[in-house]
Image (cartoon, grey):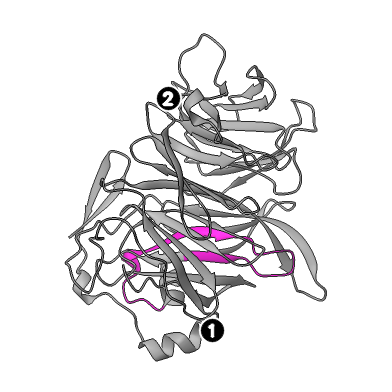
């Protein structure tokens, strides 16, 4: 029996995990997944049973931040995971974290307590150096997602549904005063917001109301909403992508991927406001070469670069038989790309956060066992010493009892 967990709701799903696994042997898997990856570093965030909820990295400054289930931030290096510091940032659940893209000394954290806080990680003892929130007198608006734009000038927070409205708040990062707010673009919780990676005034949002919206803050308030796309299913997470169109000639198309609550992945053409491709959970399971689709989950979509196909990070959470793999999304097809295998701990932890370094292909992931893994492209090398507790997910020695569903 496996528990499907999301927030405070638990759905009981009957799954015979003894029948799960790969549909082919390891030799066949290696022939399909041609890009080798190895685990270059692996560490636990502490001795307590802490979840890793979110991860962000500033690659150039070699800094990694992990948001933990005790409302704290765990700072390390991105390569060897050497600890820098740990500090409490909120009184309630952390919903996301982001480094300032132009100044990695500042880390933004947001919470369901209705605040977005800025921390100078050189001196966290002084407390937060800036706080953003709804500055009206209409009560707390619990944030469900937030992002900072590529030049560090704009901040946007999306909220849960409060009474009859869901809010998008926008700030100039130099001032805690709300620059503008919108309450009529979504009808339910705003599950994810993300600024465009190169256009600082472009933002996309998705919601449990099934909509993906694209905004241009260069426009007037009446024209700020540029596109609205109906996925016809609850949206959990989106990602801006540059997708190549290969019919007759190569044309770079602006696209957005969205992971749905049913573990499907949709790719939408932004300018046409129309779907391009859709991958079902069963198709993802088939591409992963897994027997049981019910234990397979889409985790993240990654943009690899201007001339490369995007990647889908996906996995299976079956205890003692889990996997973590990357697939390419090419012309409406999913193709095997790389296997991420942790020889010491297996792949039994449920992944909550993952980031990708376009410069060198590095992947960092973390999850519910409190383990951070660094994955590097290339042949296998020895893993750095794990200086923390004996990990219960060491599948060759101990039995693992873990839910087969995550809120990735």
x, y percent for residue 306? 74, 64
Closer-to-camera residue (278/141): 141
C-alpha distance separating marks 2 and 1: 45 Å
Residue at horizontal 66 percent and vertical 54 percent from the top: 274
x, y percent for residue 137? 52, 8
x, y percent for residue 335? 54, 77
**Mark 2 — residue?**
113
Judge left or right: residue 161 versus residue 34.
left
Identify the mark nearer the N-term, 2 or 1: 1
Residue at horizontal 46 percent and vertical 77 percent from the top: 381
Judge left or right: residue 144 versus residue 332.
left
Q: Are marks 2 and 1 in contact (CB under 8 Å)?
A: no
**Rendered view: 332 above or below 91:** below
x, y percent for residue 70? 33, 37
At mark 1, the secondary structure is loop
At mark 2, the secondary structure is loop
Query: Which stretch is magenta?
Result: 289-313
Residue 365 visible in rendering = yes
Q: Residues within 10 Å of mark 2 (few under 14, many from 20)?
A: some
């Amino acid at each position: 029996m496996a528990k499907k967990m999301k927030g405070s709701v638990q759905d009981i799903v009957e799954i015979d995990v003894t029948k799960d696994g790969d549909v082919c042997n390891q030799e066949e898997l290696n022939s399909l997944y041609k890009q080798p990856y190895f685990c270059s570093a692996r560490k636990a965030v502490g001795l307590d049973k802490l979840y890793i909820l979110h991860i962000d990295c500033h690659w150039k400054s070699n800094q990694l931040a992990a948001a933990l289930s005790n409302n704290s931030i765990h700072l390390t290096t991105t390569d060897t995971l050497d600890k820098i510091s740990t500090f409490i940032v909120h009184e309630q659940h952390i919903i996301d974290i982001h480094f300032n893209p132009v100044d990695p000394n500042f880390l933004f954290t947001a919470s369901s307590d209705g605040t977005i806080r800025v921390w100078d990680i050189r001196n966290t003892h002084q407390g937060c150096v800036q706080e953003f929130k709804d500055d009206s007198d209409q009560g707390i608006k619990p944030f469900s997602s937030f992002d900072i734009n590529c030049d560090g000038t704009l901040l946007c927070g999306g909220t849960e549904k409060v009474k009859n409205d869901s809010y998008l708040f926008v700030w100039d990062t130099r001032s805690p005063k709300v620059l503008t707010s919108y309450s009529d673009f979504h009808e339910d919780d705003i599950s994810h917001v993300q600024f465009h990676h190169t256009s600082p005034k472009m933002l996309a949002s998705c919601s449990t109301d099934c909509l993906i919206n694209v905004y241009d803050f260069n426009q007037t308030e009446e024209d700020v909403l540029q596109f609205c796309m109906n996925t016809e299913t609850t949206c959990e997470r989106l990602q801006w992508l540059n997708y190549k169109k290969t019919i007759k000639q190569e044309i770079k198309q602006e696209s957005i991927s969205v992971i749905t609550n049913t573990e499907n992945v949709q790719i939408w053409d932004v300018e046409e406001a129309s779907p391009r491709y859709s991958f079902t959970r069963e198709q993802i399971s088939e591409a992963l070469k897994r027997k049981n689709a019910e234990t397979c989950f889409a985790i993240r979509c990654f943009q690899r670069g201007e001339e490369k196909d995007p990647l889908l990070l996906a996995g299976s959470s079956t205890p003692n038989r889990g996997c973590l793999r990357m697939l390419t999304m090419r012309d409406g097809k999913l193709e095997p790309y790389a296997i991420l295998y942790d020889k010491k701990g297996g792949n039994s932890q449920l992944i909550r956060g993952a980031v990708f370094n376009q410069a060198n292909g590095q992947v960092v992931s973390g999850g519910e066992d409190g383990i951070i893994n660094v994955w590097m492209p290339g042949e296998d090398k020895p893993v750095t010493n794990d200086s923390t507790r004996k990990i219960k997910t060491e599948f060759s020695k101990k039995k693992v009892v873990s839910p087969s569903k995550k809120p990735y």
